[in-house]
Amino acid sequence: MTALGVLLTLLAATPAVAETGTVGDLELLGPAAAAGWPGAFDGFAYTLVCNVDDGGSMTVRARPSSNATVVTRLRRFTTVEVDTGQIQGSWVRVVSADESYTADGMRQPFRSLGVEGWAYVDFLCAFEER
């Protein structure tokens, strides 16, 4: 195997590291899936879009595949409700999303986005409101 092949293999095997720390009104607790979907009730959990650049977004897709049709893109700190009973590989079923926080992590008036689809778990963080 070439040096490039070894490097790519190592990068692919590296676990996701999600955002942690305090941002505005939010306490980011790291990867929601790795933490066992904290706060999940009856198979559903509230998470936040994270691990995207400022101004970036997470793609919600029609099926659990990076090649599936794009349903929408959700910005950083969008609240995403997921069905933890519907996980396929590294994808989880999104049942709703809303904008309750600004890009700075500050509370704002609730706005439902009416989104359903699939999200890649590495872009979802566990959180608590401070």
Image: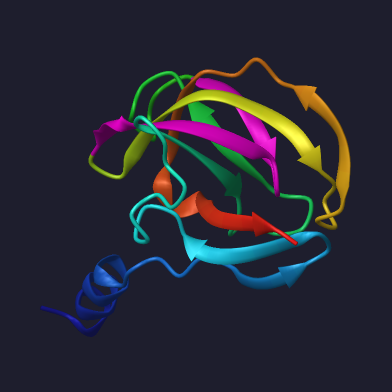
State which quarter of the image contains the C terminus. bottom right
The front one of 63 and 20 is 20
**Vertical placement of residue 7 versus 15, above or below:** below
Determine if residue 52 is in view.
no
Residue 79 in the image: x percent, y percent? Answer: 65, 39
> In the image, 83: left or right of 50?
left
> In the image, 118: left or right of 2?
right
Determine if residue 93 is in view.
yes
Residue 93 in the image: x percent, y percent? Answer: 39, 27
> In the image, 77: left or right of 70?
right
Residue at point 52%, 18% (across, down):
116
Residue 124 in the image: x percent, y percent? Answer: 51, 49
- Would you say residue 83 sits in the magenta stretch? yes
Residue at point 86%, 53% (across, down):
106
The front one of 128 and 16 is 128
Residue extending farthest to the top is: 114
Q: Quadrant of residue 6?
A: bottom left
> In the image, 77: left or right of 55?
left
**Vertical placement of residue 42 versus 39, above or below:** above
Q: Which stretch appears magenta?
A: 70-88
Residue 14 in the image: x percent, y percent? Answer: 31, 72
Q: Quadrant of residue 43?
A: top left
Count of number-bearing discs = 0
**Vertical placement of residue 17 versus 49, above or below:** below
| Secondary structure that dominates the magenta span | strand
**Vertical placement of residue 122 versus 118, above or below:** below
The front one of 8 and 102 is 102
